[in-house]
Image: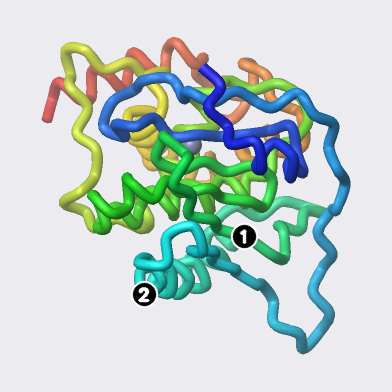
Amino acid sequence: MNRLPALIVALAVSPTLFAQPAAPASDAKPDAKPPAVAPAGGEPAKPAAGATAYEIKVDTSDAPELKAYGEKIQKLSEEWYPKLIAMLPSENYAAPQRVVITFRNDYKGVAMAQGNRITCAVKWFKERPEDLGAVVHELAHVVQGYRRGKRPGWLVEGIADYLRFFHYEPANARPRPNPERAKHTDSYRTTGHFLNWVQETYDKQFVVKMNAACREARYSDDLWKEYTGKTLDELGAEWKASLAKK
Ligand SMILES: [Zn+2]
């Protein structure tokens, strides 16, 4: 179902859109689809030397009671947006200089990112103010900046949740996939756990390389073998076996 607020569709700067499901612990598919609008341009410029590197704007005008919370989100974003950018480097890529985070009453999901714009649901963050990691996940999508080419949605979400759970969240909040049921393609935190395992086991630059491939429209299933010597299915089976050992 497409629940995008009309304003967000109108302001879309990219056809690429990422949304989180209402229950982030589940692996449900995002409930928002990319809007059928053409990119409106506005490619971010590199900051001039000496200028503030990144600008974060948080708009809580739809819910003035969230003003203080919005300031907290702004501080968090000013700290973590540059960190996330540093975690996903690739040649000739500059992440958007400006990010706009808007809290909306009429957005029914959790949060979503579209180009350099993030929408957060007022209701969700009023009920779950501790869910700051959801904003970090969306900031990761802004940094990913995938616009062209094809790549699996579970990988896109997995990279965002890898950054969230293995860099931002405390260790005791890390995902613990069920050894019986988990699949490496389950998306979100389960794929995040899988990506961390691949990285720790095979290649410390794995996520950086895979992100660069997605960003540059070079993704192919063959890359798993190129980077690790194992196919995706072989890696998934090994990872699953490693879960059962714990
Ligand atoms: Zn996402």
Tag 2, which secondary structure?
Answer: helix
Q: Are marks 1 and 2 in contact (CB under 8 Å)?
A: no
Q: Label 2: how many residues lie within 10 Å, few (<14), some (14-19) or many (20+)?
A: few
226 or 173, nearer to the observer: 173
* Quadrant in which the C terminus appears: top left
**On the picture, is 95 further left or further right than 240?**
right
Residue 215 horizontal/vertical position (percent): 71, 38
Q: Position of residue 204 (x, y in %)?
A: 48, 46
Q: Residue, x 60% and y 23% (percent of image)? A: 33
Residue 231 in view, yes or no: yes
Q: Residue drawn 63% across and 51% down?
A: 117
In terms of image quadrants, where is residue 192?
A: top left
Q: CA distance from mark 1 to mark 2?
A: 17 Å
In the rendered view, does 227 fall on the left or right side of 71? right
Please indicate, yes or no, whether residue 228 appears anywhere in the rendered image.
no
Identify the residue under disc 1.
Answer: 100
Q: Residue type at mark 2: give it.
A: Ala
Amino acid at circle 1: Val
Percent coordinates x, y for residue 221 in the rendering: 62, 16
Is 26 displayed left or right of 12 in the figure? Answer: left
> Mark 1 or mark 2, which is nearer to you?
2
